[in-house]
Amino acid sequence: MSAPINNIVNKHSRTFIFKRLPRNYRQFTSSSTEDYDLVVIGGGSGGLACAKAASQLQKKVAVLDFVTPSTQGTTWGLGGTCVNVGCIPKKLMHHASLLGDAIRDSKAYGWNVPDQVQSDWTTLSTAVQNHVKSLNWGHRVQLRDKNVEYINGLGSFKDPHTVRVKESNGTERLLKTRNAVIAVGVRPYVPSQIPGAVEYGVTSDDLFWMKKSPGKTLLIGASYIALECGGFLNGLGFDTSIMVRSRPLKQFDQQMAELVAESMESKGTRFLRKCVPVSIEKDNRRRLVVKYEDLTNRQTKEEVFDTVMFATGRHAVANNLNLEALGVEVDQTTQKVFGGHSDDHERTSVANIYAIGDILHNRPELTPVAIQAGQLLADRLFGGSQVQMDYDMIPTTVFTPLEYGVVGISEEKAVSRHGEENIEVYHAFYTPLEFAVPRRDASHCYIKAICFGDRILGLHLIGPNAGEVIQGFAVALRCGATWSGLSGSVGIHPTTAEEVVKLHITKRSGADPTVTGC
């Protein structure tokens, strides 16, 4: 293994000078017993992955984790957003809502079930929370087994090589470290300028830990979080409305986004389009009175809800890290950390400080991205690797009632980059076989492949189990799959995935893309 490198910042030119140190150099000349090879601030998916990977390379590692309560006082255990208030509880509640659809469909398949079936929020939320708590405990066990020191405390930088920790019991420690990783993630943004928003509004940080049924719910925002939560709440039988200022899923392909929204509307979710909240008050029955403005006619309207949830963006949890004093560059709007210095995608403007996961500016806010970036970073720091995180062709899925899976870029972005005349879009409306017997509406089940010559730029699918389907095709695309290779493949019959390899009608042709036959 090569000798360690001491990173020195030239403050005038903002360049890095790398000075190679003797082979017998360990960490510091200090006699402190709290000298670490790596301190990770943040116990979410990326931070934990990085810490465990570094420890497996025989390095002394500490990971700090502290959950600042939400605006409604909600806290949780080790594991970050994904485990506690994100991917895991969301997917479980999404699945619970789909089970309701399956029960209703089962009558057509000969099952004797009641005409009306109901979900019980207390039973569901308790089961979800118990599973989450088991994951919290599992993470703590893994850290112990891999010799990673876990500190339940709030971390901040004293200097580039010193992390100050305020532990939950009130004591303070200073940790000397050769390298540090910022992995504190992001938290929901609640617009404090709206009267009553902070006082009465909840976020996804609170929804999954609510003991009381949410009842009639208004979700404010048009992000994937708003649509996912709105989708499963409606599926569980709650009166659900989504307030949209501009357009749904504006960071995604807009044809697909509109199909997702239309599908949700057809299943009973109400969209209040071109509307913005004005104020929230609590009435004498402890219900929430929401005043909102319709931007199409500038009229102010009023409606009563039991729960109001904000999904109006997420901001980085970086204010208390003392980054500015260290010279770590951050985006002034989002407080996200800039990476990409000295040809390392995760290195900040301070040579020994790195950032991974949602805190990193202009990177996908996705758990698998944070995990892989953290593992690769540990390998580069301590394992002699040169492999960088590849942020291209990363798949994702929006877990709405009809899932939307995607890998690659949108049609709009493809046209912008290459010109409409150079883009070919193969597409199809299809009917999943399982929809046929109960005669479920399949009018929003749609696939399209966006191609530039033989190169596939993006693959988009709306339908059941879209995440499972797109994951497999994402691997193929990263391995260099082409349109001729895809369209020449044999499908597995009868599946949704086979509809992808059967694509043959182009938008340019104007032919009907509806799949007929089996």
Image (spheres, rainbow, N blue to C red):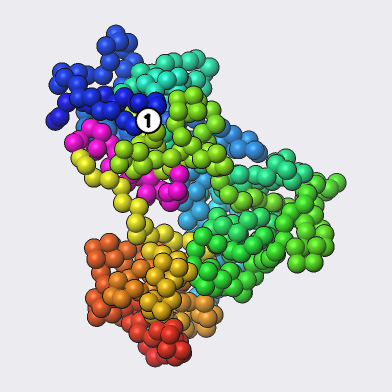
**Residue 349: in magenta span:** no
Is the C terminus in the top left, top right, bottom left or bottom right quadrant?
A: bottom left
Coordinates of residue 57 in the picture (x, y in percent): 21, 32
Coordinates of residue 318 in the picture (x, y in percent): 51, 33
Q: Residue at x 64, y 67 (%)?
A: 269
Coordinates of residue 381 in the picture (x, y in percent): 25, 33
Rendered view: 439 above or below 249:
below
- Residue 104 falls left or right of residue 387: right
Please say whether residue 335 is visible from this viewpoint: yes
Secondary structure character of the magenta stretch overall: helix
**Residues drawn in magenta:** 361-384
Q: Helix or strand or loop: what does disc 1 sit on?
A: loop
Quarter-of-image position of residue 198 = top right
Q: Residue furthest front?
A: 12
Is the N terminus in the top left, top right, bottom left or bottom right quadrant?
A: top left
Task: Name the one closer to the observer, 114 or 118.
Answer: 118
Mark 1: which amino acid?
A: Ser
Which residue position holds label 1? 13
Rendered view: 288 above or below 431:
above
